């Protein structure tokens, strides 16, 4: 028995959108003990951890800012008319608890948490957190088969290590994920890569392992629909993770992030590419690297919340959905 009404966001006509406790998109909060958990199909989850950050910190504060900004989101998509909360039972599952004093323990805690989310049959839509958060999520979701992945990012996050052999930073998660067999490199597409670099070690690894990189200079010469048609072709019909680093977007639109790179897409294009994920078999998605201390106007968090809504609408169109 599914209580569809329970999983609707609080209407701004019932309680103004500036009022009330700020859950993701004004959805009900469903704790692990709540018997309604078994009815949840998409869980919006905060990952307040930036233990992988190598330079400007702050994404540990991302989930709170994203929850606050997400109260601006209404129930119906402005272009497609999709009403995701009527398609799927969505809920705010709260935050996964990191250990701010230990990277290793945080990775373990995240993996255990997301394993239970997966066991409950819930598709996780995560608000980071820095990009290292994605590694334990992939460890949980790719337990029995490697996943494809579409990554929107200025960076490949494919480096071997930092600072003398440190293997776990937000610049290394996808190198670990490929090494551990969590990702099928032939089904991975990385979009928007740009900026100065220490060296080409990450791109050399991508080339050698078969990962497709669409660098920004190519991205800007092609229509988004063309880029995303290629990306959908690369991941094919198999299970796919979508990871969206807010630094994919030009810092004119999303300054509140730790590693900004100029020359990126506008907020319009940023939303458009997420909308063009429709048809991909999405088994999980995240929006990471929003850093509120660098976001004094809140514009980055609002764009981040809007991108989460686009990702949610794409999930509602996922062909592998358990309904
Ligand atoms: Mn990243
Ligand atoms: Mn990045």
Image (cartoon, grey):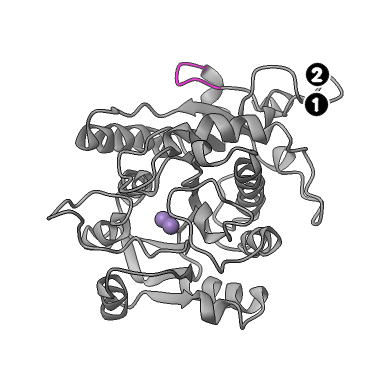
Secondary structure at badge 2 equals loop
Secondary structure at badge 1 equals loop
Task: Say if 2 sits above or below 279 in the image.
Answer: above
Task: Say if 12 sits above or below 303 in the image.
Answer: above
Quadrant field for ligand 1? bottom left
Residue 96 in the image: x percent, y percent? 40, 29
Q: Which disc, if any, is residue 294?
A: none
Q: Which residue: 53% across, 59% down?
A: 281
Residue 198 in the image: x percent, y percent? 28, 68
Instruction: Pick the quarter of the image with the N terminus.
Output: top right
* 268 relative to 119 in the view: left or right: right
* 255 relative to 109 in the view: left or right: right
Q: Which residue: 52% across, 72% down?
A: 231
Q: Which one is nearer the viewer's eye here, 161 or 253?
A: 253
Residues packed near mark 2 inside 10 Å, few (<14), some (14 to 19) or many (20 plus)? few
The answer to whether residue 13 of the structure is visible from this angle is yes
Residues packed near mark 1 inside 10 Å, few (<14), some (14 to 19) or many (20 plus)? few
* 160 relative to 311 in the view: left or right: left
Q: Which residue: 84% across, 19% down?
A: 14
Question: Does residue 223 show up magenta in the picture?
Answer: no
The residue where tag 2 is placed is 15
The residue where tag 1 is placed is 11
As measured in the structure, the alpha-carbon distance from the residue carrying label 1 to the one carrying label 2 is: 6 Å
Q: Which one is nearer the viewer's eye here, 98 or 238?
A: 98
The answer to whether residue 40 of the structure is visible from this angle is no
Tag 1 and tag 2, C-beta contact below 8 Å: yes
Q: Which one is nearer the viewer's eye here, 230 or 240?
A: 230
Give the magenta range.
30-34
* 69 relative to 108 in the view: left or right: right
Question: Does residue 31 show up magenta in the picture?
Answer: yes
Residue 4 in the image: x percent, y percent? 71, 29
């Amino acid at each position: 028995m599914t209580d569809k009404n329970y999983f609707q966001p609080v209407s701004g006509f019932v309680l103004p959108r500036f009022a009330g406790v700020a859950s993701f998109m004004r959805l009900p909060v469903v704790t692990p003990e709540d018997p309604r958990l078994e009815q949840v199909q998409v869980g919006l989850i905060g990952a307040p951890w930036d233990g992988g950050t190598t330079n400007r910190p702050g994404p540990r504060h991302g989930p709170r800012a994203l929850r606050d900004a997400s109260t601006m989101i209404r129930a119906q998509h402005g272009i497609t008319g999709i009403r995701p909360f009527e398609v799927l039972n969505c809920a705010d599952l709260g935050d996964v608890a990191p250990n701010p004093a230990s990277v290793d323990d945080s990775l373990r805690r995240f993996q255990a948490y997301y394993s239970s989310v997966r066991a409950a049959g819930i598709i996780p839509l995560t608000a980071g957190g820095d990009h290292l958060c994605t590694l334990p999520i992939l460890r949980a979701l790719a337990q029995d088969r490697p996943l494809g992945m579409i990554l929107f990012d200025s960076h490949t996050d494919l480096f071997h290590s930092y600072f003398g052999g440190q293997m776990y930073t937000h610049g290394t998660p996808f190198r670990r994920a490929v090494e551990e067999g969590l990702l099928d490199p032939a089904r991975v597409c990385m979009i928007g890569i740009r900026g100065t670099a220490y060296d080409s070690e990450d791109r050399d690894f991508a080339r050698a392992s078969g990962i497709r990189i669409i660098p920004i200079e190519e991205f800007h010469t092609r229509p988004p629909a063309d880029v995303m048609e290629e990306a959908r072709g690369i991941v094919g019909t198999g299970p796919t993770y979508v990871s969206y680093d807010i630094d994919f977007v030009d810092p004119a639109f999303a300054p509140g992030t730790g590693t900004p790179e100029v020359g990126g897409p506008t907020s319009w294009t940023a939303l458009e590419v997420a909308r063009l994920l429709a048809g991909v078999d999405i088994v999980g998605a995240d929006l990471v690297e929003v850093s509120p201390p660098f976001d004094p106007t809140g514009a980055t968090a609002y764009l981040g919340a809007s991108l989460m809504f686009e990702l949610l609408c794409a999930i509602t169109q996922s062909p592998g959905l358990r309904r």
